[in-house]
Amino acid sequence: MKTTDKAVQSASDIGIGKTPVESKLVWSASQVAPSLLNGGHKPDTAEASIPREPLESILRTEELLKRLSRPPDHQKENSALVALVSALTESPETILQTLADKILGLLHAGSAGVSLLTKDEKRFYWAAIAGAWRPHIGGGTPRDFGPCGDVLDRGIPMLFSHWERRYPYLSTAIPHADEGLLIPFYVSGKAVGTIWAIAHDTDRKFDSEDLRLLESMGRFASAAYQAVESIEGLKLEIAARERAEAAVRQRASGLEATLRRLVDSNIMGIIIWRYDGQILDANETFLRLVGYDRNDLESGRLNCRDLTPPEWHSADERRLEEIAATGTAQPYEKEYLHKNGNRVPVMVGGAVFQETGNEGVGFVVDVTDRKTAEAAVRRSEERYRQAQVELTHANRVTTLGQLSASIAHEVNQPISAIVNNASAALRWLDKGPPDLEKARQALTRIVANGSRAGEVIGRMRALLKKTPLRKEAVEINEAILEVVAVTRGETANNGISVKTQLAEGMPLIQGDRVQLQQVILNLLMNAIEAVNSVGEGPRELMISTAQVPSQSVLIAVRDSGPGLPLVSRERIFDAFYTTKPGGLGMGLSICQSIVEAHGGRLWATANIPRGAIFQFTVAAHSDNADREL
Amino acid sequence: MISFSMGLLLDWCLASFISSSKAVISIIDDDEKFRAATTDLMRAMDFMVEAFPSAAECLASPHVHRACCLIVDVQMPRTSGTELHSHLVESGYAIPTILVMPYPENSVRARSWHRWTKGSSFGT
């Protein structure tokens, strides 16, 4: 029994001979799939073509008598017989298995079992097995295929050594059999099978005592068997098992046909690969995908690795590790190299054949169409983004157009002041005596006004410049005051007072100063228009700043206009939505995209007692910690 | 850009209105720098000057009736230059007024034309 563990562990290796359907084990994918790929022709069973070693060369029966025999252990034999009797009364249907178990114990054998002829006497069926070979239970061989047939033909006990020379299918049975002792099993004088014991250990040699025990057990089994109502019942059971086997075979061939259809369909590429990347077989879809033909395949020139661009190799290796660990690889995207050098984007998945471990099946789906569609979406998004940049610029220009009166005023004010100051200075100098102090004061004012005019021009240029988003530290209060200065003409012209409520100690914010100023400018211009649309009441705007949690600053523009209807409050940020006659409907949409590019949010609420509040947040600059020190 | 100087213009304008060189000129402009420059120029021309940042403060001044001429910025919050002028005219003070505007605006000019005023146009 010490070999049992080993046997269970290697149970997956038990493929007896090249006749998978003969074994209890369900046929394996590796043995069927290649035939699927080359036309659905099933491999022939090999029984007819095996060259036979003469029986005598492997028989050691005569040695049984020569070997030193151990003394008979009648007590143990008796207790075994008692156990068989009680098994007979309690569960007669398992009598053969009990027999196998008892033989195993009495003979100190590695495996023991009972093989019975099927009803048509064409096959042996392994009705009961104990020990290392127990996993084979339910399997079987053709009548003239193994040692049972020879034993039954001669009707005598036989001891075999190296029997795989005559019966090659036994060479694959694990653990390996060193000696096999078989006796015919008779029921009502008719040979119906064999009883056998196997030594896997080379130190265990059967002797005459073993033969005696086996025959004793065999006689008992025969008697017991007759006592069981009829062997017919058992034969019926065997027939049922055979039907079940046939059904499995039929299902297998049904599955085979289904697989065949799948392989032949053009849904996906299917390959059989080896662990080293060699493609053993592939369907037409796959070959078309990579541009090779069946000759390339059959000459063994196709290798997954060669067909894969180098940058995908490491991804492939990760999948192979996954396959080695779990047996399958989750589908993933990669590229194959077409014979013409093009790259083919594909989705691949795979699984390893459990039996062999170094071969597997893979499916390959061409995802070129999907990739093309994705690229198209990306391109249109890029176009949309570019269009928005253009519109941002256009909007800025439009805003400047609306502001031209205000700008003219802003530029003219310091220039007019300069002219007047210069005139005054000339007059002070013309006096007799010249009033030099007054002239100096006038000239000093000219200098101040000159720089003021320069600043205004500089701001205009900054607003006009079409620059990509810059990330710089922006002092938001300063930026707001500049915008207020730019719009002062416009607000004054409309009789609107602009108040500011700017919080002190505001953190620097990170962003594009000009774009943020454009947002503020836009909100201010909207506010001015809103106030203008109302005939009466206070004409006020208020711009405020505040620091809010999560490292952001909040900028709010309040107006005393008519406020926003609830419906449009939801839509005002949509592109091309406008409440103004002649409006483009782009201003707030662009503002929103600028604010969002700065990691912030722009929204509108109602002002109390009237009007609207537009406010937005912008993330603070990351260097603020340094600044506070 | 500026076709003629404010000084020459004022020389011409004021000669038309003002007989006494000791007359008081009121300057109303919300832009502090422009107001300072104009005030200094008037003083260099030996006028007496009162300057106000808004129309309201001008009207609140106890000396408003002494003003013989107004120099008013058209663009101002709340009460604009033209409104101030109209208000004074309607109250019985028909004061000669110079309106200062960034560029000629026909509507303003039309409104002001009949009020003994002259538009002082800059930036054209």
Image: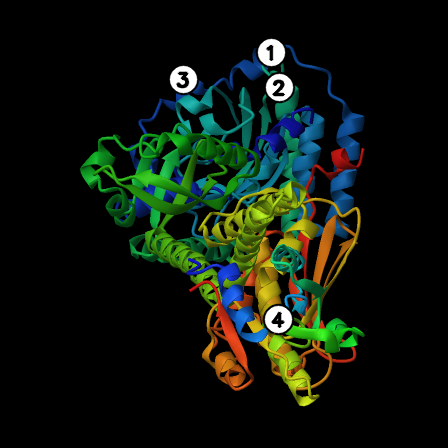
Instruction: Find disc 1 in the rendering and name its residue.
Output: A67
- For label 2, the SS is helix
Disc 3 + disc 1, Cβ < 8 Å: no
**Chain letter of disc 3 in the image:** A
Task: Identify residue type, mark 1.
Answer: Arg
Mark 3 falls on what kind of element?
A: helix
Query: Which residue is more in the foreground, B18 or A628?
Result: B18
Q: Amino acid at mark 3?
A: Ser
Judge from the rendering whether residue A180 lies leftward or rightward of residue A89; answer left or right: left
Which residue is disc 4 drawn over? B72
**Residue located 46% across and 72% down the image:** B104
- Please give the label number shown on residue A57: 3
Tell me the quarter of the image containing the N terminus of chain A. Answer: top right
Q: CA distance from mark 3 to mark 1?
A: 19 Å
Q: Are circles 1 and 2 on residues that touch, CB within 8 Å?
A: yes
Q: Are marks 2 and 4 in one subunit?
A: no
Give the residue drawn at x 81%, y 74%.
Answer: B62
Distance in Å between CA atoms under marks 1 and 2: 8 Å
In-front residue for pair A593/A450: A450
The alpha-carbon separation of the residues under discs 4 and 1 comes to 140 Å
Characterize the local packing of mark 2: few (<14), some (14-19) or many (20 or more) Cα atoms within 10 angstroms: some
Q: Quadrant of the C terminus of chain A?
A: top right
Q: On screen, B25 above or below A55?
A: below
Q: Could you say where residue B52 lies in the image, as x and y percent from the top left?
A: 72, 66
**Dot 2: chain letter:** A
Pointer 2 residue = A208
Work out whether disc 2 and disc 3 sit on a shared chain: yes
Q: Residues within 10 Å of mark 4 (few under 14, many from 20)?
A: many
Quarter of image, res A108:
top right
